[in-house]
Image (cartoon, grey):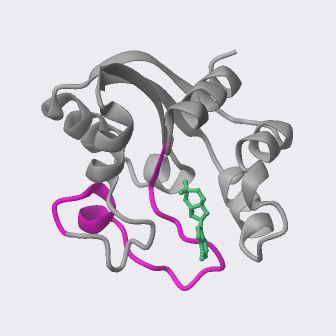
């Protein structure tokens, strides 16, 4: 079934000028870009977005990292795109993410307190609906 997902190009991806390369992979896979915006989110958006991680050791560094520069938010549509984009992104840790994935090809560990892993993709239909409402008000 056709789904929609939220993709974020995180501040490291924008700063490294990888937005175009990331968009190219989404488009080459055959997914559709429905909406896109460059955002400088405030803390409340990030607190809502990452509510499930509150209290974890990487939570504060994660929020600080996400506040460190502009983010590109993209509404992407396609059949099974939620799972499909996560497959394009690769696993959370960019050091061991498989080559061929966004994180595997472009990411690595920078020795910081948070995984700067270039992209976010919603992990379920429920998350996608919640996150899209948050980033595309
Ligand atoms: P994402 O999956 O978009 O959402 C949670 C983020 O927290 C994740 O990307 C990483 O950026 C970060 N993260 C998750 N697990 C860890 C961890 N163990 N250490 C540091 N950062 C993490």
Of 83 and 137, the residue lying toward us: 83
Magenta span contains residue 108: yes
Rendering coords of residue 100 (x, y %)? 16, 60
Rendering coords of residue 133 (x, y %)? 66, 21
Left or right? Give the position of 61 relative to 131: right
Left or right? Give the position of 86 relative to 64: left
Query: Is residue 87 positioned above or below 64 on the image?
Result: above
Residue at horizontal 63 percent and vertical 32 percent from the top: 131
Quadrant housing residue 19: top left
Residue at horizontal 29 percent and vertical 56 percent from the top: 102
Prevailing secondary structure class for the magenta stretch in the rendered image: loop
Ligand 1's quadrant? bottom right
Residue range corresponding to the magenta coloring:
99-121
Q: How many numbered badges does the structure rendering display?
A: 0
Rendering coords of residue 68 (x, y %)? 68, 54
Residue at horizontal 30 percent and vertical 31 percent from the top: 80
Of 8 and 17, the residue lying toward us: 8
Quadrant housing residue 49: top right
Residue at the extreme front: 1
Residue at horizontal 70 percent and vertical 15 percent from the top: 137
Query: Is residue 26 positioned above or below 117 on the image?
Result: above
Left or right? Give the position of 84 relative to 61: left
Left or right? Give the position of 91 relative to 50: left
Residue at the extreme bottom: 111
Quadrant (top left/top right/bottom left/bottom right) for the N terminus? top left
């Amino acid at each position: 079934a056709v789904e929609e997902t939220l993709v974020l190009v995180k501040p490291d991806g924008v700063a490294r000028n990888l937005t175009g390369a990331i968009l190219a992979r989404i488009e080459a896979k055959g997914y559709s870009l429905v909406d896109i915006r460059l955002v400088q989110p405030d803390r409340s958006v990030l607190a809502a977005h990452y509510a499930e991680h509150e209290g974890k050791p990487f939570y504060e560094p994660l929020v600080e990292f996400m506040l460190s520069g502009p983010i590109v938010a993209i509404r992407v549509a396609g059949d099974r795109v939620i799972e499909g984009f996560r497959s394009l992104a690769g696993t959370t840790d960019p050091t061991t993410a498989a080559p061929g994935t966004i994180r595997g090809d472009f990411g690595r560990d920078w020795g910081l307190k948070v995984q700067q892993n270039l992209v976010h993709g919603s992990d379920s239909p429920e998350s996608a609906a919640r996150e899209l409402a948050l980033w595309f008000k």
